[in-house]
Amino acid sequence: MDKRKEEIVEVALKRFAHYGFNKTTMNEIADDLGITKANLYYYYPDKFALIKDVIRHVVMQIQKEEKSIIHSYRNNFLEVMFSLLELRASYLKKYYVLHINENLEWIKGVEINDFLEECHAEELVHLKSLLLKAVESGELLIEDVDETCSVYIEIVKAIGIMHNVHDIITGIPNQENVEKILDSQKRATKLIFENRINRK
């Protein structure tokens, strides 16, 4: 992404994070940037294209930090798992309005679905790399790493949706849900993995 697009994404992210995708206009983003709407449309032909790059930007930030956390693994599997959940919770708090907006039907086009599937696949890759490290070190006793990763991510995502479905439907954010989500995800993580940790 070129420097001008990065600047547009950063400015749009601030406005989207505060007002949501639906309530933000391209005019407002152009005004925030101090450019004409025509100039903004030169870089982004429509709001959907800009939203996609904004979501991609946030996801890439998360993935970069996740890699760093996973790299820090030193036979402390649950600790690393909790750090990953806390990282996601910190982004969820910061961009909660984006989170409830990304579940709205109008943003669920084919392109965004493809992108979200790519994100899911990358999430699986990251989790698998951590689980393999823990299995190879002898700390974690798991036979089917792929299946464990897939089911775990489904459970964690379902917990998130369960706690904020009301916010998604109404579009009214309630950031207190983030702590409930994090607590539930940590309890599920402990329940799933604690008895699979080799204490010897």
Image (cartoon, rainbow, N blue to C red):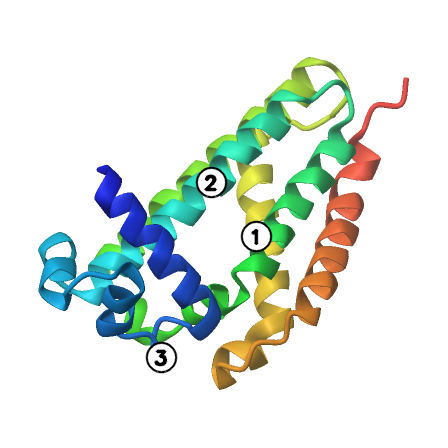
User: Which residue was labeled with disc 1?
Assistant: 91
Say whether residue 144 is left or right of residue 23: right
Which residue is found at the position 28% from the left and 59% from the top? 33
Q: Are marks 3 and 1 in contact (CB under 8 Å)?
A: no
Mark number for residue 61? 2
Q: Quadrant of residue 65?
A: top right
Which residue is found at the position 63% from the left and 52% from the top? 90
Q: Quadrant of residue 199?
A: top right
Mark 2 is surrounded, within 10 Å at the Cα level, by few (under 14), some (14 to 19) or many (20 or more) other residues, namely few
| Label 1 – label 2 distance at C-alpha | 9 Å
Mark 1 is surrounded, within 10 Å at the Cα level, by few (under 14), some (14 to 19) or many (20 or more) other residues, namely some
Q: Is residue 183 above or below residue 77?
A: below
Q: Can see residue 159?
A: yes
Q: Are marks 1 and 2 in contact (CB under 8 Å)?
A: yes
Residue 45 position in % (x across, y down) = 11, 60
SS class, disc 3: loop
Between 130 and 95, the one lying in front of the other is: 95
Which residue is found at the position 34% from the left and 60% from the top? 12
| Label 2 – label 3 distance at C-alpha | 24 Å
Q: Is residue 155 above or below residue 126?
A: below
Badge 2 amino acid: Gln
